[in-house]
Image (spheres, grey):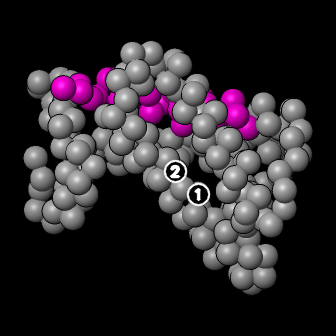
Amino acid sequence: MCKEGFGHICSFAKRMKMNKLMPSNGNTRWSVFSIIILSWLLVGTLDICSAFLHSYLKRGTMPGAILRYIASTAFGKDRFTDPKIANIAGLLVHYSIALGWTILFFFLYRRFRWMQKNVLATGIGYGFFIWAFMNILLLPVWNNKAYVFKAEPAIVNALILMAAIGLPLALLAKKKIAVN
């Protein structure tokens, strides 16, 4: 199942005991690596496009401003003088975070049988978990500010994460992975 050049990824998957994940369709061979990469690119793209669309419709904010905000949050406000570099850095930070959430999802999916039973509950729950972790724990630490709950943005942002990350991951896992 491991191809040449991907040994480090396969050994990582084995350490996480993800090597027991098998393709659900006998005609198509899906490796854990390919499932994670496909899922990561999909949910990362859905999430950032949702953020772009929501910010543009709500405030007229252009995508570059969103990416520069992500970069400034991660690296500091004065870190980048060139907006193009800041945009690239913001996109890299965004996709890195999306990769982490994707890997964590498949790790948990293998471990907890209850996640395999209800796609809708798993997707909604995981999207809410991401929202809570990012907004209540991670972003306040990065911004050095306490979290202040505001109902409308909290609900909208949680729904975006449920629809863009939680549900697609749950659906892909159900479709592509049979857990022994």
Under circle 2, the secondary element is helix
Quarter of the figure with residue 29: top left
Residue drawn at (49%, 24%) of the image: 122
Q: Answer left or right for 15 relative to 67.
A: left
Q: Which residues are magenta?
A: 157-180
Is 85 placed above or below 153 here? Answer: below
Q: Answer left or right for 49 relative to 147.
A: left
Q: Answer left or right for 21 relative to 121.
A: left
Residue 180: horizontal and vertical position, in percent?
A: 18, 26
Residue drawn at (27%, 49%) of the image: 16
Quarter of the figure with residue 117: top left
Residue drawn at (19%, 51%) of the image: 14
Circles 2 and 1, Cβ within 8 Å, touching? The answer is: yes
3D distance between C-alphas at marks 2 and 1: 6 Å
Does 59 lie within the magenta span? Answer: no
Residue drawn at (24%, 27%) of the image: 179
Does 179 lie within the magenta span? Answer: yes
Residue 3: horizontal and vertical position, in percent?
A: 11, 56
Identify residue for label 2. Answer: 98
Amino acid bearing label 2 = Ala
Under circle 1, the secondary element is helix
Viewer can see residue 11: yes
Q: Nearer the viewer, residue 18 or 152?
A: 18
- Identify the mark at residue 94; answer none if there is no mark: 1
Q: Nearer the viewer, residue 24 or 16?
A: 16
Quarter of the figure with residue 56: top right
Amino acid bearing label 1 = His
Residue 53: horizontal and vertical position, in percent?
A: 73, 41
